[in-house]
Each structure stands twice: as C-alpha cells, then as structure tokens.
Amino acid sequence: MVTRNKTRTVRLTLTYLILLFVATCIIYPLLWTIGASFNPGNSLVSTSIIPKNPTLDHYRELFAGKESLQYSHWYMNSLKISLFTMLGTIVSVSFTAYAFSRFRFKGRQQALTLFLLLQMIPQFSALIALFVLAQMLGMMNSHWLLILLYIGGQIPMNTYLMKGYMDSIPVDLDESAKLDGAGHTRIFIQIILPLCRPMLAVVAMNGFTGPLGDFVLASTILRTQEAYTLPIGLFNLVNEAMGASYTTFAAGAILISIPVAVLFVLLQKHFVSGLTAGGTKG
Amino acid sequence: MQHRKIGLMLSIIPGLGQLYHRQWMKGGLLLIVSIAFWITFADLLNMGLWGIVTLGTEVPRDNSIFLLAQGIIAIIVLLFGTGVYVFNLRDSYRNGQKRDQGMRPDSLLSDYRNLINQGYPYLVSGPSLFLLIFAVIFPILFSFALAFTNYDLYHSPPAKLADWVGFSTFAQIFTVDIWRSTFFDVLSWTVVWTLVASTLQVSLGILMAVLVNQKEVRFKRVIRTIFVLPWAVPGFVTILVFAGLFNDSFGAVNMDLLSLFGLDPVPWLTDEKWTRVALVFMQGWLGFPYVFLVTTGVLQSIPEDLYEAATIDGASMFAKFRHITMPMVLIAMSPIIITQFTFNFNNFNIIYLFNGGGPSVPGSNAGGTDILVSWIYKLTMQSGQYALAAALTILLSIFVIGIALWQFRRTNAFKEGA
C-alpha cells in the first residue's frame, strides 16, 4: 500500500503542477491587458502588470469623442448587430429545423445535403459578391444588411445542430398533441421548443459570438468610422504606428471582454449540455 | 380528347388548365401570378440574361459586374418560375386524370387542406431559405462566375469592361511560376496549420479535462472557471492582445518572459518561422477550453461502475484510461473534433488579426503565414485581383468538400442525416 500511496502523491503533485502552469498561461495575458489599460502613457515598454501610477486616462480617451476613436459607437453597433443576429438566427433556425425534423417533403434530402456543403465553404470567400451586392442595393454601411448576411450565414450549421437535437425528441409527443387537436405551429411552440432549450442556448451563443468577432464581412461593408464594429475599430487602434495606442486599445478590450466573459462563465452549464448532446448525436 | 391532355395543353399558359377543370380560384390565382411575374421580372430577365452572356458591350453605359450579378439573380428567379410552372402543368394533368376516371377534381377546400399539410414545411422554412439564397448561395454563385472572367483592377467598371475568359485564370495559377509556387506554399501551410493547431487544442483540451476530473483534485470549480476564460473572452480581443504581447520591440514575451530566463529576444512578428510557432501556441490557448468543456461533460457521463469493475479486475490507472476513458471520449467527441479541424482550416481571424498574414517573404505573392482564406481576402481587398481570388475560392471549396465527403463516407454519418 505504501508504494500505491506514493505513486498517488506523485501523480497528484504532477497534476497540480501542470494545472498551475496552464492556469498561469491563461491568466497572465489577461492580467497584463488589465494592467496595460491602467498604465500611464502610450508606450508599452514600461508597462507592468501592477502599474506604479495607475490612471483612468485611457478609459476617458475612449469616450472623448475623437474623430478616429468613436468607441461608444463601435460598442453599440457591435451589440446591436450581435443581438439582432442572435434573435434572427434563433427564430429562423428553430422553424427550419422543425420542418426538417418532423416533415418528409420533396427536396428535404437535397436541402440537407446542401446545408452540409454550405457549412464547408466559408461565406466570406464570396466577399466580392457581398461587396457588389451592398453597392447594388445602395446599402454600404448598412447594419441591417450585415445582420441579414450574418443570419443567412448562421443558418446551415445551426439548422443541422438543431435538427439533430429535435430528432432525439420522441415523435409520440407530437402525435398525442395532434390527437388533442393542436396544430403544427402550436405543437412546435408549446411542446418541441421548450424541450430544445439546451440546443437553443448553443444556437444563441453561435448567433451572438459569430457577428461579435467577425472582421471580414464587417470590414467589407462598413466603411465609415461611426459605422464600424469593435473588431474593426480595435484592430485599427492596435495597428497604429508602433503601437502608439496600445494602452487605449487595452482599455477598450477590457470594457467588452468583462461583460461577455462574465455572461459566458455564468451560462456555460447550459451550453455544455447542448454541446455534448449535439456531440453524441451528430 | 381526354381531360388530362386538354388540361396539360391549356396549362402551357398557367392557370388555363385549372380554369378548364372549373377550379376558378386556383386557375385565376395562377394566371394572375404568372402575369405579375412577367411584368415584374421582364426587365430583369431581359437585362440579366443579355448581361450575363455579353458582360456589357459599351463603356461607360454598361457595368460588367452589375450585369453579371443581375444575370445570376435572373437565373435564380427563372429557376423559381420554372418550379411554379412545372407544378402548374402537373397539377392540371393530375386533375384531368381524376376527371378522366370520373372523379371530381380537387375542391378549393381540399386544396387548402393539402396546402396546409404538405405546404407547412415549405411555409416555415421558406423565409430562411430565401435568406440563405440571398446571403450565401447568390454570393457563392457570383464568386464562382467571376473566376471565369478577367475581372481585376485593369478590367473594372466604370472605365473598362470585363470579359469571359474561360479557364485561363485557373491555368495561370498552375503555369505562372510565382502563382504556382505561392499557391502550393499557401496550401501546404494551410494543411500543416490545420493539422498541428487542431491536434494541439484537442489533445490539450482532453488532457486538461482528464486531469481536472480526477477524483482527488480539489478546487474543481475554480480551476474550471479559469480554464474556460479563453473561450469566454471574445476571440478577436485576445488575438489583438497577443499581437501586443508578441511584439518584437515592446511585447512582454520578449521584454519580460524571455529576459527572465536570460534568453535573447525572438523576432516573433518578422520571422516567418517564429510567427508560425506563435500562431500555433495561440490557437492552442484559444481553442482548448471549448474541447475541455465538452470533454468534461462527457467524462461526467461515463458510468462509475465501469471503473469499479475494472478496478476489481486489477486494471491499472493507465489501463483504465486507455480502455475506458479514451474510447468513450473519442466516440462522443468525434463530430466536435472534426469541426475543430474545419474551423481552423478557415480560421481567418487569428492569421489576419495577429500579423496580417505576414511577415512578407521574398518570391511569394502571399505573406509567410497566410492561409488560403486570408490570402483570398488580401487578393480581393488589397490588390484587386478579383478573378484570381474567385478561382482560388473554387479550388478551396473543391478541396474542403472533397475531404468532407471522404470523411462522411468513412464515418457513414452521411446515410440519413438523422
């Protein structure tokens, strides 16, 4: 028993060492950013995690309303686009998935195959087309066009996920409701949808994070400072000559990261049950 | 003459056949819809079909690119029209058949019921499909069409027209030395990047989940919360943060970390090899929490008796891991693992936001760390090589779809989709 205890101690020590190392790797860059955002001056050369003379200057600068730094606009734009894309994705995906899961109609199999293929081709490899589309419609700089494009792009993959989840809900439930005289839409909204909650959480997450992090489509269609979203605005800040605005960027990064991160950490349980279910069913 | 033949003949003009079968409502509706269709779309069809064939004949009146777009929309509209038309013919024929057999044609009420029952899936998925056509399918078709034109900076409206050139852009990719070598460089780095980065993040995620999930490990909640942080913080933010951390001259990695161990600064952003190393590590950092989260879920669902039975049989820790944990995890996770690979294959953000696909390398038209999608982006947005970018899009699609089909056939997940 002695050797067994010994190997156990060794194993646990090793485990803790590895976990500690990984945790440090995760926390270090995050803390560094927080530190940078409070550092006086623009240069990062003298940046330390705990600044000697912390300052809120960079946060003030974000909202100072400079021509090339419209942080509050970018922030609201990003939130607006992400939220509406999320809502639109949830509605269109759940209805479509219901149709594909519960009905056998002409073209169903072909459409499913099409969805599968469309998942593979990234939407933004068709950039020029989207650019031309925006010009033809006279909708350059339009957030609503962007939202529609995002929702369209979210449909194939998420419909697949949602349909897979709905397939695992027994059809008997529908049948008995039908005997009670419920119509398709009522069955869908009152019976199927509540049971899909874990997968709805996943779809909502995809619909929110997709547009929030997108650089490509947004930079193609949005060309004025006020119309920018956070990725474009912050990218430009970072790439200003010699990192001259890096500390300001850090402040901007903190303001978006903390609310999103807190939300995700709090909601992670809900995502996981959907993700694992999707994982096992395919 | 039989009713079905008369009905079919009359329905060459949509609605007349239905009127002949005394289905007044349906016939009238079809007639009105088809008239409206022609009135609304006549110009578009005329213009679009002429445009897509010629791509314009006169500058500055014609804009080749707009004409091409109109042409594709015209074709999509025409396909829909044909769909309705075929439905009209079949409907008329079928009702004629019923009359020939002495039955009454469908009444409006039964048509309505049919529509509600069979049309329901079309009705609820219709708006999504429309959006899909508008936002995804049309752009992809348009891109594909562009690959067969000579559209670039020197052939762009309003000053110049573009023309159909067939496969010559594809031929260029494979025959002009600099394009060929760039293409194969980018492709091979894309493949290496996908394999290495995905494998790293998947194995790191699984390893961490297994470590944390050991019975004796304490503070599980705290550890898990820390480990999901890279997933919870928006990815574009962290990539930009890393771009600062790895900066050659002021970044903390060179200034603080390496100097702490007495190492010389490393040219992270200016030497292609080091940029690649940094990218792979970053993707490991960014990508492992997702795998970690899902694996943790799977691990907790493995029944405890399996391990107990194995312990009674005298299995070692390692044997239990190899014969119980690993197979369970891999089976449950395989779809998610596959998505990690496809995700990284198209992982534009990390490549572009970190170092713009750079550093630039001599003798190549792409940056040293450009993957296919970021190269396509730069060709489009920075150097105006639209046709070339479009041709590369096609090659990329063929490559990805080929691999996906092969994979699906192998795992047999393709047979029902249910």
Image (cartoon, grey):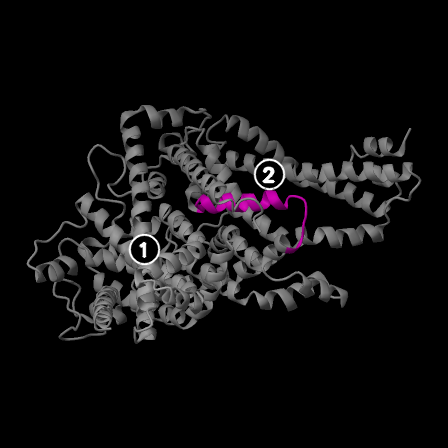
Between residue B239 and residue A36, name the one nearer to us.
Answer: B239
**Taking A251 as reference, is B60 left or right?**
right
Q: Residue B254 lies in what quarter of the image? A: bottom left
Q: Position of residue B417 (x, y in %)?
A: 56, 48
Q: Amino acid at mark 2?
A: Ile
Quadrant (top left/top right/bottom left/bottom right) for the N terminus of chain A: bottom left
Q: In this rendering, would B40 be left or right of B216?
A: right
Could you tell me which chain the residue with mark 1 belongs to?
B
Which SS does the magenta portion mostly show? helix
Mark 1 lies on residue: B203
Q: Residue furthest right?
A: B102
Q: Is residue A106 magenta?
A: yes
Instruction: Give the image location of residue B308, x and y in percent.
Output: 40, 68
Neighbour class for label 1 at 10 Å: few (<14), some, many (≥20)? some
User: Is residue A108 shown above or below A72?
Assistant: above
Residue that appears at 32% across and 41% down: B190
Place of residue A9 in the rendered image (x, y in percent of width and height, measured from the top left) = 22, 71
Where does label 2 land, which residue?
B76
- The picture places residue B245, in percent across and down from the top left corner, at 20, 59
Disc marking residue B223: none
Q: Is residue A133 magenta?
A: no
Position of A186 with respect to A247 (left or right) is right
Q: Pointer 2 indicates a residue of which chain?
A: B
- Structural crowding at the residue carrying mark 2, measured as other residues with C-alpha within 10 Å and reported as few (<14), some (14–19) or many (≥20): some
User: Spatial distance from mark 2 to mark 1, Cα to Cα?
Assistant: 45 Å
Relative to B154, does residue B98 appear above or below in the rendering?
Answer: below
| Viewer-side residue, A212 vs A74 | A212
- For the residues beneath circles 2 and 1, the answer to whether they share a chain is yes
The kind of residue tagged 1 is Ser
> Can the viewer see residue B227?
yes
Which of the two discs, 2 and 1, labels the residue nearer the N terminus? 2
